[in-house]
Image: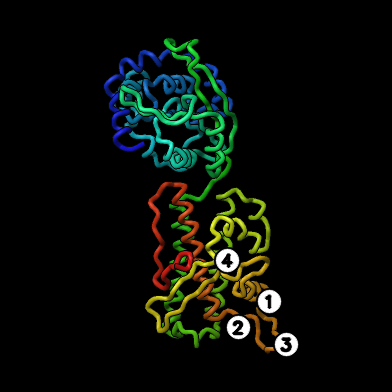
Amino acid sequence: MDDKNTNRTIEYYNTHADRYSEITRNADMSDIYKRFEEHLKPGSRILDLGCGSGRDSKYFLDKGYDVVSLDASETMCKKTYELTGRPALNMRIEDINCENEFDAVWACASMLHVDKGDMIRIFAKVMKALKVGGVFYASWKYGKGEQTRDDGRTFANYTETKVCDMVYSVSGAALEDVWTSQDVRPDRTGQGHLWVNVLVKKTRVVITEKEFLNIFWKQYQIIEKDVRISSEYVDIHKSNFSTFSSRYINMFLNICSNIDSLIEIYCKIVEEDDYRKKYSIHDRLTPVLRKFPDIRLDAVRTIDTFEDIELKPFSAFVGDRIADWWNDYNLVKHARSDRNEKTGMYNFQRANQKNVLTAMAAYFIVCNRIYEEICEISATPKRLLKSKIFLYVKNGE
């Protein structure tokens, strides 16, 4: 929802808090409470997202749950405090930023004010706030499209199908139940006003942006520093591509191992566990190549080196073919002491400058592609990760 619509909606609740509390506080929520509590344990930590009058926060507190209440309306936060004796956070739903903190999130008639264009992003943030196995309840007015009322409030309406589509598009979210219900506010009972309700469970941990940067991108930066130091002794130049060393063995194995781990994480993100469990890099790469078919065109160009070099590490992954640099990695990893009878070359000699640079380029490209996907999920502004060796040329452009 744009800021203008959001501010008008918030202002409505600030202005009409007494009236809104009066008509919602006595609504019979027993049926939905029962469905929700089937997924809770004694003392579960609940985020009441859009707490309004405090009706639901009070119910959960009285049942012995640990409740954090939140609402974008300052006046509604005061109403919650008056009813529960507990302060509520004055914060917009869009601004929540928690990770693996809550056993459950309750969003009764609150996310209906989120713009449809932002809904999946906010949904993903809610899932990030949940612990694995945690449950999320939300409800919207039944219908299609968006509408702005004369009182200034903007509503996003949903059907069961649209809610399900939304759940299926959020990584780590599993649909538990979806159903419609009658409006239970005393002044609306029996008038045919419908709501669509959903219960969603978080099935697994998905790597967050912070985790990605600290685990994978930091590793890239450490290895890149080693590569830059090695260039003080052996210039990065095509005439040195065949140069091999024990130091290159260590870098080559480290880089490719990180690529493999990162691809495995990506398979988890997009729920491709069957591919994640397969041994072949070609199989594991399938979800990446499906999502980013143009990755085969992605290139890097060296910067601040004696010679300008362009590398396209994924160009050879076509059909059943596996790139030579990855085949060489497997030979260095599993059979480095073997010797080719025709060439007389040991496999450890495949840990050369060319393969180290190509693998490093692949790691850099995969980091950027997957980081872009993670940013899309977390709604972080997209930006390219910067290398001190390479310039990223996306799609070969």
Q: Amino acid at mark 2?
A: Gln
Q: Amino acid at mark 1?
A: Ala
Write down the residue under mark 1: 335
Q: Residues within 10 Å of mark 2 (few under 14, many from 20)?
A: many
Q: Amino acid at mark 3?
A: Glu
Q: CA distance from mark 4 to mark 3?
A: 28 Å
- Quadrant of the snapshot with the N terminus: top left
Residue 341 badge: 3
- Whichever of labels 1 and 3 marks the residue nearer the N terminus, that label is 1
Q: Residue at x 54, y 58 (%)?
A: 292
- Badge 1 element: helix
Write down the residue under mark 2: 349
Between 8 and 91, the one lying in front of the other is 8
- Whichever of labels 4 and 1 marks the residue nearer the N terminus, that label is 4
Between 216 and 95, the one lying in front of the other is 95
The nearer-to-camera label among 1 and 3 is 3
- Whichever of labels 1 and 2 marks the residue nearer the N terminus, that label is 1
Q: Amino acid at mark 4?
A: Ser
Write down the residue under mark 4: 257
Q: CA distance from mark 4 to mark 1?
A: 16 Å
Q: Residues within 10 Å of mark 1 (few under 14, many from 20)?
A: some
Q: Residue at x 42, y 12 (%)?
A: 26
Residue 82, how many percent across, how many down?
A: 32, 19
